[in-house]
Image (cartoon, rainbow, N blue to C red):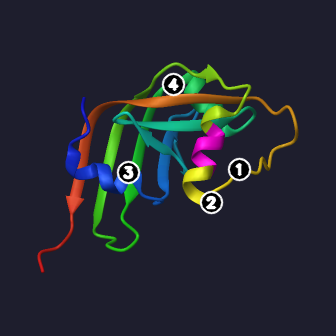
Amino acid sequence: MRIPDEFHPLLGSTAVAFVSTLGRAGEPQTTPLWFLFRDGAVHLSLVEGRQKLRNLRRDPRISVVVVDPARPTVYVELRGRVADLVPDPDLLLEKAVAVKYTGAHTDVEPPGTPRFATSVVVERITAQRGHPA
């Protein structure tokens, strides 16, 4: 499903995404994450050993909510599944995400920690466009 143009500015901003996956017993697990919106898709960099990656390997369903920090009644939720979890040994996605949010990349993980790149295959979009003025 294509993400409507009206949400591109929010997804291209430095707003943080709240990313939810499903735990082993079906419980939601939500984490604030930096992300990259590129070529009409939300891209995530995931770290080996973290709960989010373990959850997605078992069940690829995901929800990504991005709230406009300047207007908290404006948000978009993207529900769907992750695409393939692709090894990112050169940290290409992680570096692009870091540059988006901070202007530079500093890896905070121990050297050699594996990362994986994925994107969200959107199946449903919900949104709130704020309150009328």
Question: Are the residues flagged by discs 4 and 1 in contact, CB closer than 8 Å?
Answer: no
At mark 4, the secondary structure is: loop
Question: Are the residues flagged by discs 1 and 2 in contact, CB closer than 8 Å?
Answer: yes
Question: Are the residues flagged by discs 2 and 3 in contact, CB closer than 8 Å?
Answer: no
At mark 2, the secondary structure is: helix
Which residue lies most toward the bottom here?
133
First in sequence: mark 3 vs mark 1:
3
At mark 1, the secondary structure is: loop
Horizontal and vertical percent position of residue 124: 26, 36
Question: Are the residues flagged by discs 3 and 1 in contact, CB closer than 8 Å?
Answer: no
Residue 97 on the magenta segment: yes
Q: Is residue 93 left or right of residue 40?
A: right
First in sequence: mark 4 vs mark 1:
4
Q: Quadrant of residue 101?
A: bottom right
The mark closer to the camera, 4 or 2, is 2
Residue type at mark 3 is Leu
Magenta region: 94-98
Query: Which class describes the residues within 10 Å of circle 4: few (<14), some (14-19), or many (20+)?
Result: some
Q: Quadrant of residue 133?
A: bottom left
Horizontal and vertical percent position of residue 84: 52, 19
Label 3 sits on residue: 11
Horizontal and vertical percent position of residue 19: 49, 46
Q: Quadrant of residue 41?
A: top left
What residue do we see at 31% from left, 73% from top?
71
Q: CA distance from mark 1 to mark 2?
A: 7 Å
Which residue lies most toward the left here?
132
What residue do we see at 25% from left, 29% from top?
1
Query: Which class describes the residues within 10 Å of circle 3: few (<14), some (14-19), or many (20+)?
Result: many
